Image (tube, grey):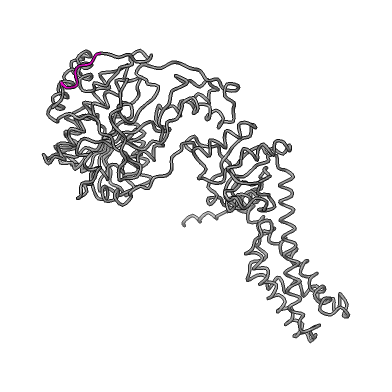
Amino acid sequence: MPPSAPSFKPPAASTSHTSMRARRIALNVALDGVVSAAAAPVARWLADPAGGWLHPLWFIAGGGITLLVGGLPFRVPQQYWRFSGVADLFNIACASVLSALLFAGLLHVAGYPLPTPTFPIIHALVLLVFLGSVRMMWRLAARRKSTALASQRILLLGADHEADLFIRAMERDSENSRSVVGILTGGSQQAGRRIHDCPILGTISETPAILERLFAAGKLPDALVLTASEIKGRELARILEAARVYDVDVQRTPSLTALQPADRVELRPIAIEDLLNRPPVALDSQGMARLICGRIIAVTGAGGSIGSELARQIASFQPAVLLLIESSEYALWQINLDISERFGDVTRHQIVADVRDRRRMAEIFGKYRPQIVFHAAALKHVPIVEDNPIEGILTNVIGTRIVADEADRAGAQAMVMISTDKAVNPSSLMGASKRCAEVYGQALDMRARAGQGGMRCVTVRFGNVLGSTGSVVPLFRRQLEHGGPLTVTHPDMTRYFMTVPEAVGLVLQAAVRGTHERAEHDATDRRLKQGGIFVLDMGDPVRIMDLAFQMIRLAGLRPETDIEIRFTGLRPGEKLFEELFHGREAPVPTDAPGLRIASPRTVDFRVARLAMDELEMACRANDLGAIMTILYRLVPEFLHNRDGGLPVAVSHPDPEMIAP
């Protein structure tokens, strides 16, 4: 005899929740019944004052019963009184009309004449007023209780509709401990009006003056809350500075459209990325889809900060095959897992390989035949390359040459090479190595554009990316977590910054423009034909000292009081100011948004190939002296800051020695 199936017992928590819901609905029914029972005799008296209040007595019971029946189709017993809104009021109105009609019908069946012909209308209106008033008083009581418990006074900055959404979300939050003392909006004609009884004090641009006025009146808020996501850059910096003067915290709301009725309103600190003063760029998504969709795409350095974001954005355009090439097993596992979760339908291969291994790269490209190669593999940290110069040259120069040669041999249409602002007037071995890689890429591209065959090579140069591995922002965050100090190499040091998704989006934009030659050969095409390289529009440079101060303030701390800032001096290879263009490379806009073009000195392909051969031989022989000689010859503007002080002029070979 088979064993009997175990009986199912619902979890205790589920049973408890069901019981609680039933009790709440029963309470709604009871309260509505009492209200509607009172409404019936009141309506009768209003319709016929001479007839008395309680004649006949069963008016009371009849009023309650008919509302219960009339309210069921409109789910009146299930309403959440604390959150009653326009939709609930409409349902109450419909239920009131139906209940009044049922009550009138009940009187007719029982043989009682209507007090007056207008009695059903009066009854419906009394029910609507009574039921609506009870819900409104309940909601106001809940709001007053929340205000009484509020421990943080906040000033909202954003559009009027965003303030409305946020205040409603706070009302839904049973654990809310904030009260809105005012609103600043973008419109200049809204001051003096009120939203949910909260006054509009002025515009966002008037924040410093309004804070001064509130401070003088002793009504300074505890925090400024930004409800508008578009408050960024210089406008945000001015708000932060004004808040700092009065020691007021600044926070941002989550996405207001993502708030659900049961959510707590969790404010978050201002992200350092929001301080970048750069308008959004219109990306050519259709061009990117044409370039990538249905093709075999390879990404070297696919586990790095730029390479992994490249892989993600490329996967979103549905390539036929995505080759993830990476030398770090863990980094490769991470990006492959990420893409499998986001874009599980994209065919991909995770390939462990070192770009410096010619045999391995030839094997990979010969097997998969990628059509577009994005080359992001590099050693990019200046001090590490200074300490390991030969490894840096092998990866950044020889590795780039190997990837380019093998991609060309496998029939790739184009290679997109990631470069850096440190390649401009380099003071470090890392910068000089990336400039050498640029030289080789330029030579390849010029050969292809001159009709001599071969693969296009699109070079894209940009500055620092926020949040990348080893960059200053994660370093500052780590130091803040440990209580400081924050280390800054020099008080005047500046850098260009961009977010990783932003930079990668523009790299893809450059790939589209660099591989699509226009029939009329405009100025951009002519400059590319002459060895031009793309430079991302990085906006204004950011002073590292200012970045450190802002990050301390965003953490709710005070610079130099709570967190020390310590100057450590320039490290070997570092510069005070990075540049995106050489002095002779006038920045020229292109016809693609967010991209400019530089025209650095070029080298004939045959000369560049011979120089690469020499450089590889010197690296394999561990001959650092020969390596430096070749670097100075290929990059005559290289001014090596090997000791970390201000660089001094050195004698380089004549640049004409390498002219074609």
Q: How far from the left and from the top, in percent, is residue 169?
A: 61, 50
Q: Which residue is rendered at x = 25% and y = 42% of the image?
A: 524
Q: Is residue 479 visible?
A: yes
Note whether 618 is above or below 113 in the view shown. above
Quadrant location, the C terminus: top left
Across and down, in percent, residue 586 comes to 30, 33
Q: Is residue 390 left or right of residue 13?
A: left
Query: Residue 523: x percent and y percent?
Result: 24, 43
In this orientation, does residue 12 appear?
no
User: Which of the 4 image quadrants contains residue 43?
Assistant: bottom right
Considering only vertical position in the picture, is 415 above or below 100?
A: above
Q: Nearer the viewer, residue 189 or 552?
A: 189
Give whichever of 398, 446 is nearer the camera: 446
Q: Position of residue 38 (x, y in %)?
A: 80, 69
Choose top left, top right, bottom left or bottom right for residue 365. top left
Q: Which residues are magenta?
A: 651-656
| 66 up-or-down from 514: above or below | below
Is 583 contained in the magenta span?
no
Measuring 88% from the left and 80% from the top, which residue is drawn there? 50
